[in-house]
Image (cartoon, rainbow, N blue to C red):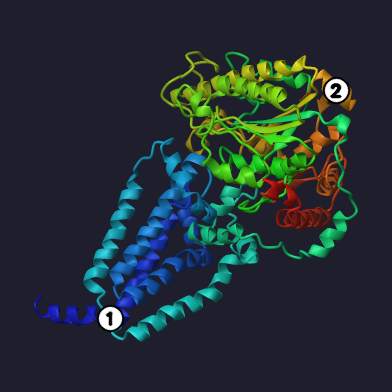
């Protein structure tokens, strides 16, 4: 053994061995990241990644490159590896927990919401798995091996810095691999792991580091292919911005209900009582339809902001952005809203200001003082307060009123170990104890919400002030990690056809008007409406009210006659009775993407912004 010691000392000083071990260690980091790329069917997916050489390269290359770059800077292989491993491991765990709890992967833009992520951790019970422990031990072992056996050095600092610079230069052509839409959408398609109806599956089917780096582009609002500003301006020039007639300026109040949907449509659920009675009574006197969202069990603001902006593809919303809130403000409306949760949640405090709200109430600046726990108000507090705020506005100002509020009650996860409402809403003994508790806790919340909603509507029913209400759910609820309750119920969520896609993504919308508004607007506001994606919901409200809207709304109203569903998932549906070839439908979608980009980048309410 002593005779081997000089040989080992000599080998570990060899630069080629150090670089070889470092590259292999970087590849090992990439393989560990793939273990946490998906929460469901983990090992099946991991085996699927290994069968796709291009995906393996795209997921393993980033940690290898980072290890080499840091080695040239630090001159220590183990240190370069340790920093890379720590970054990737933390990202991998964050991705796995986010998928488990929210069915939503970590994207680059999430790095700008660090405070929100930290605050939300307290709402979920984190846990340690065997895979987490073993992968951490493997990463530590890799660092130990490098510490003892990768001692090769590049003594000349100018050479090391030159090599580090060379790595950065090589990253420029390599970055095209991660920004190419053709590579992402077609050449790395993983059909064994992908269902085209599911955005999360599209992401996880490609691993973790590759789709994460690909998402960098989504934080920068670049023009869509073929975009020409002049062409869009010429298209919108066919329409003229229209004001709301002074005698038609009814108050419009929108309320988005957290995780609310009508589950009475599923025969698989055995209800012990009718939790939707009040909601169905309200639907009977409203204009109603399916809202086809692009999110599931989380991502509330996607529906919220599509409704407010009229856009399916939203961009980053990190600066002032055209919206219907700005339009109402331009028409002399007071524009306000409420959300009883925290102002940092989805960065609403800043984004809502960019979208045109002159004021917005959150837990910190209003609702904590009203809530029983001092933080988040439930619907029995929230809806009465919306009424009080509206009545106070009438007394103090009296100007036309537009508000958009978002509830918090109904937000998952729901307790699995107890029935918090103390009564059964589903037939007992039919489901596993955990599923039964989840269902009872969700439907208990639904019944509470519908009762408060009914009382909310009753307040405006006899009012002489014309009022229109817009009520809709943001997404389907969380029902167990990895949709366990849906699976137990046998509800088809496999996105293999339109019916299962609607099971996954569709909620309900209703548009209600009191008698005063019906008289002023000459419409009874009843009937069945078309399936709509959230970006077209305000168009339907304006159509019922008889409002024309600005040029962009007029353009999108024309579009929705043919294509009333266009989601950010890349899924669109033609209107009933409208036949579009795939080429025609693709052309309409492309045209809409151009118009949306123009709307995001050409702010038209500068005077209002400056006045604030």
Q: Residues at badges 2 and 1 in contact (C-beta under 8 Å)?
A: no
Which circle, 2 or 1, is nearer the viewer?
2
Looking at the image, the residue that sits furthest to the left is: 2
Viewer-side residue, 151 vs 456:
456
Left or right: residue 283 versus residue 354 is right
Q: Which mark is residue 546?
A: none
Residue 433 visible here = yes
Within 10 Å of disc 2 (Cα), the crowding (few <14, some 14-19, many 20+) is some
Spot occupied by residue 343 in the image (x, y as percentages of width and height): 53, 39
Q: Is residue 539 above or below residue 206?
A: above
Q: Residue at x 30, y 83 (%)?
A: 154
Which of the 4 quarters of the picture holds residue 455? Answer: top right
CA gap, disc 2 and disc 1: 81 Å
Q: Is residue 356 above or below residue 2?
A: above
Q: Which mark is residue 153?
A: 1
Residue 431 visible here = no
Spot occupied by residue 469 in the image (x, y as percentages of width and height): 74, 27
Q: Which mark is residue 518?
A: 2
Spot occupied by residue 122 in the image (x, y as percentages of width and height): 41, 37
Q: Secondary structure at mark 2?
A: helix
Viewer-side residue, 464 vs 269:
464
Quadrant of the frame with the C terminus: top right
Q: Residue at x 63, y 51 (%)?
A: 317
Quadrant of the frame with the N terminus: bottom left
């Amino acid at each position: 053994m002593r005779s081997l010691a000089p040989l080992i000392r000599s080998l570990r000083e060899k630069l080629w061995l150090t670089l070889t071990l470092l590259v292999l260690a970087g590849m090992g980091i990439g393989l560990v990241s793939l273990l946490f790329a998906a929460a469901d069917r983990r090992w099946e997916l991991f085996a699927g990644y290994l069968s796709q050489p291009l995906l393996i390269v795209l997921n393993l290359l980033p940690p290898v490159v980072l290890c080499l770059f840091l080695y040239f800077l630090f001159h220590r292989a183990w240190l370069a590896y340790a920093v890379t491993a720590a970054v990737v491991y933390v990202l991998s765990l964050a991705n796995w927990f986010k998928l488990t709890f929210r069915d939503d992967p970590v994207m680059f833009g999430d790095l700008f919401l660090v405070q929100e992520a930290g605050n939300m951790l307290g709402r979920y019970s984190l846990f340690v798995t065997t895979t987490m422990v073993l992968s951490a031990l493997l990463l530590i072992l890799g660092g130990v091996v490098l510490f003892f056996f990768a001692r090769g050095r590049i003594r000349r600092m100018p050479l090391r810095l030159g090599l580090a610079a060379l790595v950065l230069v090589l990253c420029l052509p390599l970055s095209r691999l991660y920004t190419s839409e053709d590579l992402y959408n077609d050449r790395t398609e993983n059909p064994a792991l992908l269902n085209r109806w599911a955005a999360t599956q599209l992401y996880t089917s490609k691993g973790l580091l590759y789709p994460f780096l690909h998402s960098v582009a989504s934080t920068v609002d670049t023009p869509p292919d073929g975009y020409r500003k002049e062409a869009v301006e010429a298209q919108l020039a066919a329409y003229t911005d229209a004001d709301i007639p002074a005698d038609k300026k009814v108050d419009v109040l929108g309320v988005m209900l957290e995780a609310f949907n009508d589950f009475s449509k599923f025969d698989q659920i055995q209800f012990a009582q009718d939790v939707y009675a009040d909601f169905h009574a309200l639907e009977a006197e409203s204009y109603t339809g399916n809202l086809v969202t692009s999110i599931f069990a989380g991502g509330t603001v996607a529906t919220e902001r599509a409704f407010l902006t009229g856009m399916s593809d939203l961009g980053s919303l990190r600066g002032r952005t055209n919206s219907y809130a700005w339009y109402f403000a331009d028409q002399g409306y007071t524009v306000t809203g409420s959300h009883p949760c925290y102002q940092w949640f989805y960065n609403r405090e800043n984004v809502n200001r960019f979208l045109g709200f002159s004021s917005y109430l959150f837990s910190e600046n209003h609702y904590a003082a009203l809530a029983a726990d001092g933080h988040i108000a439930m619907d029995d507090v929230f809806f009465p307060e919306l009424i009080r705020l509206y009545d106070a506005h009438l007394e103090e100002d009296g100007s036309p009123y537009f508000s958009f509020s978002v509830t918090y009650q109904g937000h998952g996860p729901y307790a699995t170990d107890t029935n918090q409402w103390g009564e059964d809403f589903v037939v007992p003994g039919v489901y596993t104890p955990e599923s039964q508790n989840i269902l009872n806790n969700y439907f208990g919340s639904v019944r509470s919400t519908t009762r408060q909603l009914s009382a909310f509507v009753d307040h405006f029913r006899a009012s002489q002030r014309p009022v229109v209400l817009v009520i809709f759910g943001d997404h389907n609820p969380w029902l167990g990690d990895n949709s366990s309750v849906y699976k137990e119920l046998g509800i088809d969520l496999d996105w293999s056809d339109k019916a299962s896609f609607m099971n996954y993504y569709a909620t309900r919308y209703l548009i209600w008007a009191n008698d005063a508004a019906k008289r002023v607007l000459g419409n009874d506001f009843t009937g069945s409406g078309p399936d709509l994606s959230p970006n077209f919901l305000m168009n339907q409200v304006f159509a019922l009210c008889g409002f024309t809207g600005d040029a962009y709304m007029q353009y999108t109203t024309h579009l929705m006659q043919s294509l009333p569903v266009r989601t950010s998932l890349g899924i669109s549906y033609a209107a009933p009775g409208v036949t579009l070839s795939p080429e025609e439908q693709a052309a309409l979608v492309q045209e809409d993407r151009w118009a949306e980009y123009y709307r995001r980048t050409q702010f038209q309410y500068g005077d209002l912004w400056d006045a604030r």
